[in-house]
């Protein structure tokens, strides 16, 4: 393993590859002199093979390079005392992107870790397509042509995302850089509308969720089976189930699960389940507290019994379950999954089940909500159970949310058993 050449990654300042048991680990390392002065993080893990001799994909290499550029810029900004380098903005789209990514007052510094990664990818695409364009030369007709090119081949959702990122950049330039050309262009963009992609129509059914759970056990990945059960039965987003890994200095809830210079946050923890098997968890997207009776979640209870190696009809009490720690733990290293690896293994398992590629792990939530409405649950109750944001204020003051969630879960199980 040690005599193998590391992957080739261009334009990735601070990147170091290390051989590991399963393949490779990629880490960004801060400059030694700045680390000694107190800069944090000193190191950030960007990739870790989870299978024997797994090589990073082209997408992973692109992500690694983009993150290295951002981490390097953040470090250099810190070295300057946190003062943005005004000379970065030279009137081009590329200069605007660099200023947006390094200015301490930019919204880029305030969004969450995964959102920053997503913004970085979009900015990289803008660099490749219009990075050399000067803001003063861009008119409304040019913007229309940009959108047409980005959406070629039916890539309307991608074009919509790129246009949203472009609006954000121009707004930043108009507000914080006080650039007249950005102000003019922002006014034009404000009056323009663009086609949006059709909403996804796919959903994961209960039968497909069961098939995935069964296949996950066959393939030696019971953690994926448990994750699928929690996602489907509880209508939870993937991030709320498996959590996410972020740098140690990333703002957010405290964590006692650490790995290198990263911490694990926002996932389900055993200590969130009380003696009555009631789960109380604060969701990652809107920070809303949910309260769910797990005894009304048959998939989850079945996976708990398998975890404890109990018969299907055996009594299960809270004392039998782990006292603390992440609920869903990868079979690789006994630590929570990364989102990328969880989705990759879920896809492998789904392929073995014959589930179409158009159906994704993210469709578990849509399938759960659809099952609830098909079962005849009142829409308002379903919205409470799913913690949809448009009734956030109502739910915030509602004292009947737990009862509504329980009613939804009972109806879903009754409907499933009838089928």
Image (cartoon, grey):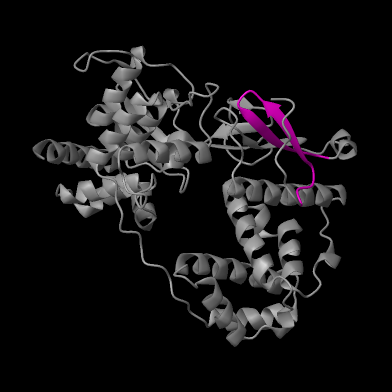
Q: Do we see residue 259 in this rendering?
A: yes
Q: Do we see residue 105 in this rendering?
A: no
Residue in front for this viewpoint, 258 or 6: 6
Q: In which quarter of the image is the N terminus?
A: top right
Residue drawn at point x = 48 percent, y = 79 percent? 193
Q: Position of residue 88 (x, y in %)?
A: 82, 65
Q: Position of residue 52 (x, y in %)?
A: 57, 27
Residue drawn at point x = 38 percent, y = 32 percent? 227
Examine the image and state in which quarter residue 299 appears: top left
Q: Is residue 16 positioned above or below 61 on the image?
A: above
Q: Is residue 34 positioned above or below 202 on the image?
A: above
* For residue 118, side relative to residue 364 (left or right): right
The magenta segment is 11-30
Q: Where is residue 315 in the image (x, y as percent from the top left)?
A: 22, 14
Q: In which quarter of the image is the C terminus?
A: top left
Our reading of the magenta stretch's main secondary structure is: strand
* For residue 187, side relative to residue 65 (left or right): left
Query: How many numbered marks have been drawn onto this rendered protein structure?
Result: 0
Q: Is residue 140 positioned above or below 320 on the image?
A: below
Magenta-colored stretch includes residue 156: no
Q: Where is residue 272 in the image (x, y as percent from the top left)?
A: 42, 27
Residue drawn at point x = 29 percent, y = 18 percent? 305
Residue in front for this viewpoint, 244 or 127: 127
Q: Is residue 153 positioned above or below 66 on the image?
A: below
């Amino acid at each position: 393993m040690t005599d193998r050449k590391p992957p080739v990654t261009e334009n990735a300042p601070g990147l170091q590859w290390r051989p590991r048991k399963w393949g490779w680990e990629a880490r960004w390392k801060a400059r030694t002199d700045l680390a000694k002065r107190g800069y944090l993080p000193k190191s950030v893990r960007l990739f870790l093979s989870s299978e024997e001799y797994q090589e990073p994909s082209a997408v992973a290499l692109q992500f690694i390079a983009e993150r290295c550029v951002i981490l390097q810029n953040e470090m250099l900004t810190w070295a300057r005392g946190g003062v943005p380098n005004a000379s970065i903005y030279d009137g081009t789209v590329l200069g605007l992107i660099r200023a947006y990514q390094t200015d301490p007052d930019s919204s880029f510094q305030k969004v969450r870790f995964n959102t920053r990664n997503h913004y970085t990818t979009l900015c990289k695409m803008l660099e490749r397509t219009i990075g050399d364009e000067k803001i003063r030369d861009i008119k409304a007709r040019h913007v229309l042509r940009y959108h047409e090119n980005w959406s070629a081949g039916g890539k309307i959702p991608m074009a919509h995302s790129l246009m949203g990122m472009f609006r954000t950049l121009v707004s930043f330039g108009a507000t914080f850089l006080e650039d007249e050309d950005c102000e003019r262009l922002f006014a034009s963009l404000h009056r323009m509308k663009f086609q949006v992609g059709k909403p996804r129509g796919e959903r994961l059914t209960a039968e497909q969720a069961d098939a995935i759970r069964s296949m996950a056990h066959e393939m030696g990945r019971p953690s994926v089976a448990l994750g699928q059960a929690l996602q489907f039965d509880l209508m939870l987003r993937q991030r709320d189930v498996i959590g996410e890994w972020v740098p140690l200095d990333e703002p957010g809830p405290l964590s006692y699960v650490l790995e290198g210079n990263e911490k694990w946050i926002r996932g389900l923890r055993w200590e969130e389940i009380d003696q009555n098997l009631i789960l109380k968890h604060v969701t990652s997207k809107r920070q809303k507290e949910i309260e769910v009776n797990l005894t009304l979640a048959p998939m989850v209870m079945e996976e708990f019994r398998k975890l404890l190696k109990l018969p299907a009809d055996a009594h299960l009490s809270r004392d039998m379950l782990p006292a603390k720690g992440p609920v869903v733990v990868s079979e690789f290293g006994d630590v929570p999954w990364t989102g990328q690896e969880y989705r990759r293994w879920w896809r492998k398992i789904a392929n073995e089940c014959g589930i179409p590629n158009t159906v994704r792990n993210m469709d578990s939530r849509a399938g759960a909500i659809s099952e609830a409405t098909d079962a005849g649950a009142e829409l308002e109750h379903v919205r409470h159970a799913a913690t949809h944001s448009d009734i956030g204020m109502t739910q915030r003051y509602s004292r009947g949310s737990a009862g509504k969630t329980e009613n939804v879960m009972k109806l879903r199980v009754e409907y499933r058993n009838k089928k």
